[in-house]
Image (cartoon, coloured by chain):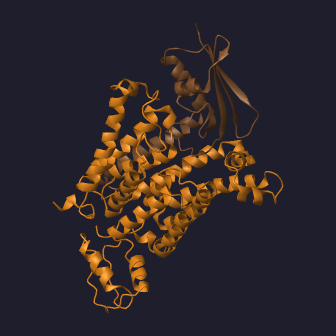
Chain colours: A orange, B brown
Amino acid sequence: MRHLNPFYVTGKAVVPELVLAVRLLAVYLLLTKEFPFSGNQGGGRFYPVVGWLGHLGTDEQFNLGVKLLFLGGIGILLFSRFVRLGALGVGLAFVLGPLSCQTCISVAHLFTGCVFLCTALSNNVTGTGLIRFQLAVLYLGADLNKVSDPDWWSGASMETLLVTKHQIASYMHVASIFPPGILSQITGIGVIVLQMAIAILLLRRGTVIYAMLLALVLHLPMVLLMQMTFGPFLFALITAYGSLLAWPRHLFCDGRLHSSTAVKWLGRLDFNNQVSPCAGSANDSPARWLRTALYYLPHPAILLAMTVLTAAMARYGKLLPLTVLTIVAFAMYAWPQRKCAGQITRPAGL
Amino acid sequence: MSSSSLKKWLPGIIFLSAQVINTLYELTQDTRTLSWAPHTTQVFYRIDAFQNSITWDRQAVEARYGIAQTQWEAHAPGNLRRLVASVEAHAPGNPDSVRISYRRNGAPEQSYLWKASR
């Protein structure tokens, strides 16, 4: 019965890091309504790329089937022990999108689907390895498309994207300092170098944190400049990278720093034996609450709260605070793990 | 790596290898479908359909092809050509011809013309 509880993330066929990642991503998709054939991904089957997908029932039946696959998959991965089966359903629904609808092609949704599919193919031996290699394949593929395109070396691609298409005033202002096209050329080549570096750093577990740092440098300026999260892409990236960090099996309360009341509440929502009792003073200052929230960030309840907050910021276009939050989370939680990342051959607790 | 460990990795390795192979394959094509090519190409296009020397209005074009008549395409010009060819191969009520005018990354305008073979 305890598997019905979405906060219970241990005791599954995949490591807790992956259970958390796909559950939080599923909640984010529901909150932002980023379904296959919804949100930024078109309205339903439309002249499929793969011919036989056009012969499966009527358009209404097919679209309903994909939505049921998606929602059923989310239900299974949230409320049962069969996380991989649920992830398979959600992943297949996302991949069916571009294959059955030519106007729905979206790298953002495809990557989101691949996070679920990699989880479906994972187990306690692979740990989070498939997600790490999925990220490497993403950057490698994106880089190959750029390396082979002369427009990325000449700057024409970045110039068209940032100046002609999006007319980003701040970028155009900085670009005016340089000879025409030079900043776009530097930016284009910089993206090529960054993406290749990230792909290489992801190949070794010990350098994952540095890959994350470069990913922040690559993605966050684009989010701020273009004022978009690229549909579910940004959050899918955050959860994919987040799953590569070791999820602490135990969180120890420090009575001098943490709020005993907050820890008591978190203890009530602890279904993984993660929280230890707090024997501190009854003084509950805002600073103690803040320190508690920061230290207990890996607690599923706080991660869920952060997911809801992120969805709200994405929904209402508050991308600057979202960017700051991402950087703070990286600095406080990921960066300190850089020295031990290589020693994690298998996620702790297994 | 033991054989039992290899078995655990194999499905994932096949899945990821298929992605790499597909990305390399799509590099040889002028379309991008499941390729990892996010915002790699910016194509500004316009679709015009003609019948009996009369140009279809915007609503008719958008209803038939499912996309805006004039817009940005963020994958590849070939995706537009493939879309028009697919619609004209399957949907009844062909126009006499369809012209896609497009500029890829600000380059000089190019066009693709589809003609009814009747």
Report whether A54 appears left or right of A174.
left
Q: Is residue A80 above or below residue A320?
A: above
Q: Residue furthest top?
A: B118
Image coords of residue B113 (percent x, y): 66, 20
Q: Residue at x 41, y 42 (%)?
A: A36
Q: Residue at x 36, y 34 (%)?
A: A63
Confirm whether residue A335 shows in the render: yes
Tell me where residue A174 sits by quadrant: bottom right
Q: Residue at x 56, y 28 (%)?
A: B62
Q: Residue furthest right?
A: A179
Numbered disc total: 0
Q: Nearer the viewer, residue A124 or A46?
A: A46
Report whether A276 appears left or right of A40.
left
Give the quarter of the figure containing the N terminus of chain B.
Answer: bottom left
Give the quarter of the figure containing the C terminus of chain B.
Answer: top right
Q: Nearer the viewer, residue B47 or A249?
A: B47
Image coords of residue A341 (percent x, y): 45, 70
Image coords of residue A349 (percent x, y): 29, 70
Q: Is residue A306 above or below residue A53?
A: below
Q: Residue furthest left?
A: A1
Confirm whether residue A243 shows in the render: no
Tell me where residue A15 sits by quadrant: bottom left
Report whether A68 appears left or right of A49.
left
Q: Nearer the viewer, residue A13 or A54?
A: A54
Image coords of residue A120 (percent x, y): 33, 49
Q: Is residue A133 above or below residue B20?
A: below
Report whether A74 appears left or right of A51.
left
Q: Residue at x 54, y 67 (%)?
A: A321
